[in-house]
């Protein structure tokens, strides 16, 4: 139960640090915007989805499953974006 809040806080902090570092260099390219998307998705998950999932887990099982699947899709999208960013950076 405690793993996911810590997971989102750490990953959100890393994404924020990445966005700040890239912005401080004055580089506003696809890598910057992909990191910004990742940061936004972590914030959405942490501040909205996780609390809502926890509420629905106790109430309505079908809504819980939908929210949990959305959370999974967002997380998978973030992983794909971060892998893509890494591959792009390795080509430089």
Image (tube, rainbow, N blue to C red):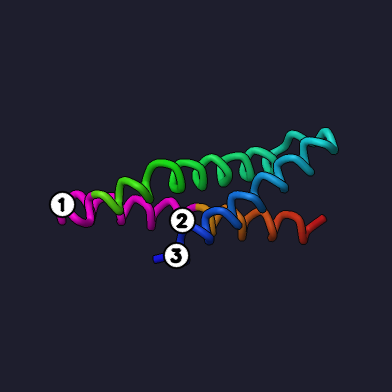
What is the span of residues highlighted in magenta in the rendered image? Answer: 56-77
Residue of label 3: 2
- Distance from Cα at disc 2 to Cα at disc 1: 24 Å
The disc label shown at residue 75, or none:
2
* Residue drawn at x 72%, y 47% as measured from the top left: 17
The N terminus appears in which quarter of the rendering? bottom left
Image coords of residue 9 (percent x, y): 56, 53
**Main SS category, magenta section:** helix
Vertical position of residue 69 compared to residue 20: above or below: below
Does dot 1 land on a helix, a strand or a loop? loop
Q: Earlier in the sequence, mark 3 or mark 2?
A: 3
Vertical position of residue 10 compared to residue 34: above or below: below
Categorize mark 3 by other alpha carbons within 10 Å: few (<14), some (14-19), many (20+): few
The disc label shown at residue 59, or none:
1
Tell which of 51 and 37 is nearer to you: 51
Vertical position of residue 38 compared to residue 2: above or below: above
For residue 64: magenta?
yes
């Amino acid at each position: 139960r405690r793993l996911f809040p810590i997971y989102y806080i750490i990953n959100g902090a890393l994404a924020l640090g990445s966005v700040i570092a890239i912005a401080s260099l004055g580089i506003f390219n696809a890598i910057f915007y992909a990191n910004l998307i990742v940061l936004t998705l972590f914030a959405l998950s942490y501040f909205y989805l996780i609390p809502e999932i926890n509420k629905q887990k106790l109430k309505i099982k079908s809504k819980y499953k939908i929210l949990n699947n959305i959370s999974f899709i967002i997380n998978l999208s973030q992983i794909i974006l971060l892998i893509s960013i890494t591959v792009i950076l390795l080509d430089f």
